[in-house]
Image (spheres, rainbow, N blue to C red):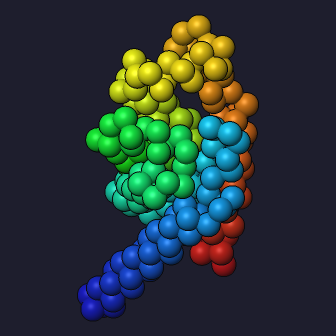
Amino acid sequence: MAAKKGKVRVDDKILKLTELGVLLAIIIIMAFVPMIGYIKLGVVEITLITVPVIIGAMVLGPASGALLGFAFGLTSFLQCVFGLSAFGVALLEINPLFAFLVCVPTRTLMGWLTGLFFKAIKQENIVGYSLTGLVGSLLNTLFFMTTLIALYWNTEFMQGLVSSLGATGVFSFVVALVGINGLVEAVCCTILSAVICKALNTWFKS
């Protein structure tokens, strides 16, 4: 009996590692295949890579959410390094360390806190999935924008962007930069996370 339970535990670990590997692969594909992970609208991007991070945080837990968030952040930073994001390249040229901090720790923290949130609400249903998807998206935007402003606000590049958007302060700048794009991103993440997690839950129970 003990051996059987041990086998189940080993099988569960293998399944979780497999799921984690699949989600990591999806993040990498979404990051480097044009118009899949990022929908670029000028200097602003609607980010959909948060979806596999949020799904992993719900299905596999906070630690996996953090790891997936780290992968998301790292691919985001590599986009800056490889010149795939004009906005990211500008940040990298000003200060590479700051660019790394804007991209990586913010997404890692988002994945971890999203997993903790889902674990805390204890709602493995469409409401819980939707709410967690929304929270994950909002955390991503909050952490990214807060770090961006904290580290780059006084730079010539950022002040030029502020002027071009007609912003008069930090709040109006955030609204102008994120605006409708942030809303669309939140809606997409909420719906996709809920639908996919619901489908996975149904499939695992069938």
Direction from residue 178 to residue 4 in the image, left or right: left
Residue 114 placed where, x, y %? 47, 45
Image quadrant of residue 153?
A: top left
Q: Residue at x 65, y 20 (%)?
A: 165
Residue 186 placed where, x, y %? 66, 40
Q: Residue at x 68, y 39 (%)?
A: 42
Q: Residue at x 61, y 48 (%)?
A: 47
Direction from residue 157 to residue 102 in the image, left or right: left
Which quarter of the rendering shows the N terminus? bottom left
The reply to whether residue 186 is in sight is: no
Return the residue found at the far top. 168
Return the residue found at the far left. 2
Image quadrant of residue 33?
A: bottom right
Q: Is residue 147 above or below residue 203?
A: above
Q: Is residue 148 above or below residue 100?
A: above
Residue 30 placed where, x, y %? 59, 64
